[in-house]
Image (cartoon, rainbow, N blue to C red):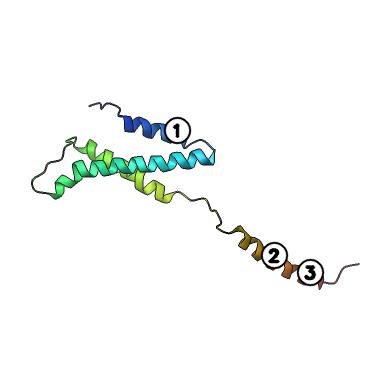
Amino acid sequence: MATKPSLSKSYVTLLAFISIFPTPNWNRWAGTHLTITMLTTVLVYAHRDLYPYATYHLEPQDKLGWHLWAKIAIAFVVSVFIPSALPRTFKPINPLVRTLRLYRVFSFSDKAASRIPQRK
């Protein structure tokens, strides 16, 4: 049973290829849009196919059997687990604090080094 490629699948594939590029701006932009698009896909699957199982009078709209559950599982892993495991880049809020701390450490070490007797 072959399914037609949809616009969202093509967009997700394009975003996945763009997120491979080493430029940080494109990588961050594509990764954010990829996560949002996949999370939207999971929410649509949940509304169409998981919510009816929680009611008595509705039936799931997609009846694909285990294919549907595999799609939902893969989309959930891609949109929730993988983005939560990715490391974030550290951007200091106030870089001056770092230089003040380093100044204090090195000024102390300068004083300590000046007390060491010099070898002749």
Q: Which mark is residue 113?
A: 3
- In percent of width and height, residue 116 lies at 82, 72
Coordinates of residue 31 in the picture (x, y in percent): 43, 41
Q: Does residue 89 appear to the left or right of 56 in the view shown?
A: right
Q: Measuring from the top left, give residue 2's x and y in whole percent.
A: 25, 26
Question: Within 10 Å of the Cα at label 2, are there few (<14), some (14-19), or many (20+) other Cα atoms?
Answer: few
* Residue drawn at 36 percent across, 43 percent down: 36
Q: CA distance from mark 2 to mark 1?
A: 44 Å
Q: Which mark is residue 35?
A: none
Q: Secondary structure at mark 1?
A: helix
Q: Pointer 1: what residue?
A: 17
Can you say whether 45 is above or below 1 in the image? below
- Which marked residue is nearer to the observer: mark 1 or mark 3? 1
Which amino acid type corresponds to the residue marked 2 in the rendered image? Tyr
Q: Mark 2 sits on what residue? A: 103
What residue sits 52% from the left and 50% below the top?
Answer: 89
Query: What element does badge 3 sit on?
Result: helix
Disc 1 marks a residue whose amino acid type is Phe
Identify the amino acid type marked 3. Answer: Ala
Q: Give the distance between the C-alpha atoms of the residues marked 3 and 2, in whole angstroms.
A: 15 Å
